[in-house]
Amino acid sequence: MLVLIGVLLVVIGFALRLNPLVVVTVAGIITGFLGKLSPVEILNAFGNGFATSRSVTLFILVLPVIGLIERFGLQEQGRRLISRLAALTTGRLLLLYQLIRQVSSALGLATINGPAALVRPLIYPMAEGAAERRFGRALPEAMREKVKAYSASADTVGQFFGEDIFVAIGSILLITGFVDTTYHLKLDALNVALWAIPTAICAYAIHGTRLFLLDRRLDRMAKEAGLITRPPEPEAQEAGR
């Protein structure tokens, strides 16, 4: 049971908001020593873990591309686009994006979006631009951080609960393989994926409600900050209808 101290260290480190990379590394080293592994074996375990999960580092290849398109005005174009869609508020935009993210992940296209590829360069600037249009000025720091958090959550919840519907995703294969090798039971990957659909629907309904209510929360924060909500213009009302 001593090896479970590593899990406790991860929980404490995340609760204290320490550097996640340092927390996980220290917890892994301590867990290895408690498990009576030698330093070479611990280093080998880290190497094998990186080699088998190296696909998670593919986002590094995307960063130069994202930097270039941001340098040539992607965020500005996103803000300009959202300024023309007056009926699309911050909450409605993120609600729509979560739906797109969840459906695309369910179809096996989980890697085409993501925080680095789409949220940071486009979705968040558009969500912030919608809020700035609503209040007529730049947002205070607290409101910007709130929009950032909800933009990231729309992406995370959409992918996490959408990708399990795709029958060839790693989590489905892990479940079927674990049950097969441990309990000697045969699970059909298709059945596991189908049973993930009700969970995905509930996740979209629950978090979608939070996104739908985001505009009201931003309104309350704006009143506390002394901002005035701008009423929609007649053209925007007609566009909304």
Image (spheres, rainbow, N blue to C red):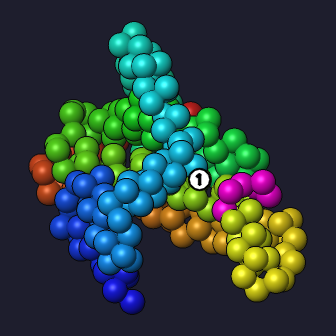
| 89 to the left or right of 175 | left
- 32 and 5: which is toward the camera: 32
Q: Quadrant of the C terminus?
A: top right
Residue 86 visible, this orientation: no
Residue stretch rendered in magenta on the structure: 166-171
Q: Can you give x and y, in whole percent of width and height, for residue 14 in the image?
A: 27, 66
The kind of residue tagged 1 is: Gln
| 185 to the left or right of 132 | right
Task: Tell me which residue sits at (78%, 65%) in the image.
Answer: 193
Task: Tell me which residue sits at (42%, 47%) in the image.
Answer: 151
Q: Can you give x and y, in whole percent of width and height, for residue 98 in the image?
A: 57, 50
Q: Is residue 170 magenta?
A: yes
Task: Tell me which residue sits at (40%, 35%) in the image.
Answer: 120
Residue 21 visible, this orientation: yes
- 190 and 180: which is toward the camera: 180
Q: Quadrant of the N terminus?
A: bottom left
Task: Tell me which residue sits at (71%, 74%) in the image.
Answer: 178
- 101 and 18: which is toward the camera: 18
User: Mostly what secondary structure, the magenta segment?
Assistant: loop
Q: Where does label 1 land, which residue?
A: 159
Q: Is residue 139 above or below residue 42?
A: above
- 33 and 52: which is toward the camera: 33
